[in-house]
Image (tube, rainbow, N blue to C red):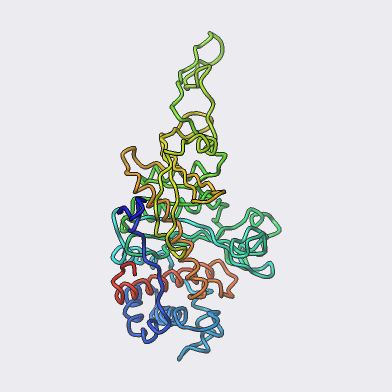
Amino acid sequence: MNINEIGIAEITDMPPLLDLTPQEIEGLADELASYHAEFADLYYRVEQAHWGCMYLQGLVAPFESKAIQPMAMALEGGNIQAIQQFIGQGRWQDEKLLKKHWQLVNGTLGEEDGVWIVDGSGFPKKGEHSVGVARQWCGQLGKVENCQVGVFAAYASRKGYTLLDRRLYLPEKWFDEDHRELWQECGIPDSTAFKTKPELALEMLTVVVAEGSLNFRWVACDEAFGKDEAFLDGVAGLDRWYFAEVPHNTQVWETRPRMAVPTWMGRGRRPTKERLLPGEPAPERVDAIAAAVSEEDWKAYLIKEGSKGPLVAKFAFRRVVAVRDGLPGPEVWLVLRRPLGEEPELKTYLSIAPVDTPRVELVRIAGMRWPVETALENGKDDLGMGDYMVRSWMGWHHHMTQCILAHHFLVRVQQRLKGGLPH
């Protein structure tokens, strides 16, 4: 951080954009083969490793479509049937590749105060036979549409950003009897249970924390995850600090209200749980707290934030008490953010970070959600993440795993060419 000429605190240690040119990507076949060799022993058979390397070649190549058929036809030695079998039915285990991937990401980007970020992403699809497809919100289209939705994790540090993991969201309607035949056609494991997007996110986070190979302190998310108290408490239970955007109607206490175990009246079961004492104030909405913040408490910061470029925003900070089941929960930071302008859009965040966390660090993390969105844009625009034609559960996860590996390969190339520094 430094102070610029007009006295605004400037947050400069943000990740560099992944912005390789097609010319810089050309001629990387040998480097890609060396990268893929890190994973080759994790496949069951030599031919699986061969097709895995070829699939990565197709994903990073400048082909107009990364669907299997046109990609296989454009690759030297490509075989449509073999690649379809590799992605759609191959019994290699994504989990082994992803765990190795996390080790490599730590070597490339790892920092003790790194950020694990989660986001959902939709993939428009026609028809009703692709696994998990349903009419649901699709961010890519900005409306409810027929699509599949994945939950994705990314990693970001001062050195850069990349994707880490993925889970396909199965809507509740897929668990009714009308979809049982599709379960068989799509190869959905019988043990698969319905899980919300925050539950899928916490599942991914739990696995990477247990693996212990990736350094990070923070967990960042938008309000789709931040409004889920079980997710936030799960993050805290894993000894990580969440920084979560939350809806404006989220309620908190500005001071911890008094509680006590009610006096037993001599009838019924003796009370054992504390309750709010009579006369204690009700919790307040976070936007109401923001409206009461005095103008001098809003401080301006300049954030170098991703593809949007430099952004000046004002921040205010309060220590508050979160609400859990109508009772006082953990003490957290309430971070308020508004851009400059006549009608600034308020953003509200809660964070479990310690009380002595510097304000500039909270501002830095407030500007660290864009890497997952940009990584997904990289994947869709440059790596064919949405070009797949496979319909199966296994095929979706296999394809996304390969896209994740391909993205990190390009991050490593950029770091070699440009030192991994902002430019």
In the rendered image, the vertical position of residue 312 relative to residue 401, given as above or below = above
The picture places residue 378, in percent across and down from the top left corner, at 47, 70
Picture residue at 42% right of the left edge, 47% below the top: 243
Picture residue at 45% right of the left edge, 83% below the top: 61
The picture places residue 52, in percent across and down from the top left corner, at 43, 78
Can the viewer see residue 41? Answer: no
Q: How many marks?
A: 0
The picture places residue 132, in percent across and down from the top left corner, at 61, 62
In the rendered image, the vertical position of residue 391 relative to residue 229, given as above or below = below
Whether residue 266 sits left or right of residue 30 in the image: it is right
**The C terminus - image quarter:** bottom left
Q: Residue furthest front?
A: 6
Whether residue 133 sits left or right of residue 400 in the image: it is right
Where residue 35 sits, quadrant-wise, is bottom left
Where residue 178 sits, quadrant-wise, is bottom right
The picture places residue 11, in percent across and down from the top left corner, at 35, 55
Can the viewer see residue 360? Answer: yes
Q: Nearer the viewer, residue 414 or 401?
A: 414
Q: Residue furthest bottom?
A: 76
Q: Residue furthest right?
A: 178
Q: Nearer the viewer, residue 68 or 413?
A: 413
Picture residue at 44% right of the left edge, 39% below the top: 334
Where residue 189 sits, quadrant-wise, is bottom right
